[in-house]
Image (cartoon, rainbow, N blue to C red):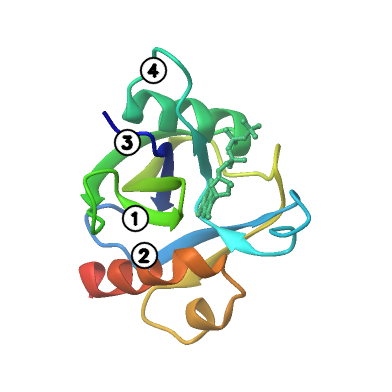
Amino acid sequence: MTSMKQIVGAALVDSLSNPQQLLAARRTAPPEFAGMWEFPGGKIEKGEGPEEALHRELREELGVTVTLGAEIEGSTPDGWPLNSGAAMRVWLAESMEGTPEPLEDHDALVWVDLGGQEILELPWIPADLPIVHALIEYTS
Ligand SMILES: Nc1nc2c([nH]c(=O)n2[C@H]2C[C@H](O)[C@@H](COP(=O)(O)OP(=O)(O)OP(=O)(O)O)O2)c(=O)[nH]1
């Protein structure tokens, strides 16, 4: 049995069929992550499946209903290692209903080109950088 805390995150793109842009979200807490950019998402709650948790988090945090696309698979069965105790699974997603707004946990959102420099210049949570690179590779 795994003891890793399981996080789920969304690579929200402008279009699943032709992804050109990614939505990055700037965290407001905790202090060590405040001001850093991340994939919207959060912890799976008891009794939830991972995709179900991701749909809930995106409704709560951004106010959107999404369609999930492919998973950007990480290096472990739990997904991408974040630290010694947590890992995150990440899915591509596209909003089907609603325009993303920073309703909870974030104070800014930005759409960045997947093929440009700006995406690499954002101060991401360091553990997210390998995921950003994999996403750029996946969508190029
Ligand atoms: N959502 C998200 N969390 C990330 C990313 N990268 C990263 O290291 N983390 C870490 C930060 C947190 O320690 C943990 C996720 O917790 P969270 O605070 O987002 O979860 P949550 O929305 O369910 O929050 P909570 O109210 O239950 O605390 O994973 C990322 O890209 N997205």
Q: Amino acid at mark 2?
A: Ile
Q: Secondary structure at mark 3?
A: strand
Q: Is residue 140 found left or right of 42 in the rendered image? A: left
**CA separation in Å, label 1 and label 3:** 21 Å
- Residue type, numbered disc 1: Trp
Q: Which mark is residue 80?
A: 1
Q: Is residue 100 visible in this depiction of the protein?
A: yes
Crowdedness of circle 4 by 10 Å Cα count: few (<14), some, many (20+)?
few
- Give yes or no for contact between labels 2 and 1 (Cβ–Cβ under 8 Å): yes
Q: CA distance from mark 4 to mark 2?
A: 24 Å
> Seen in the image, is 97 located left or right of residue 125?
left
Which tag is nearer the camera, tag 4 or tag 1? 1
Tell me which numbered mark, 2 or 1, is placed earlier along the sequence. Answer: 1
The residue tagged 2 is 131
At horizontal 31% and vertical 66% (from top left) the residue drawn is 135
For badge 4, the amino acid type reads: Glu
- Considering the numbered disc 2 on the image, is that residue within a helix, a strand or a loop? helix
Query: Is residue 13 at least partly visible in the picture?
Result: no
| Rendered residue at 50%/53% (across/down) | 39
Label 2 beta carbon less than 8 Å to ligand 1: yes
Which of the two discs, 4 and 2, labels the residue nearer the N terminus? 4
Q: What's the distance in space between the residues labelled 2 and 3, CA to CA?
A: 20 Å
**Does 41 appear above or below 13?**
above
Image quarter where the C terminus lies is bottom left
Q: Earlier in the sequence, mark 1 or mark 3?
A: 3
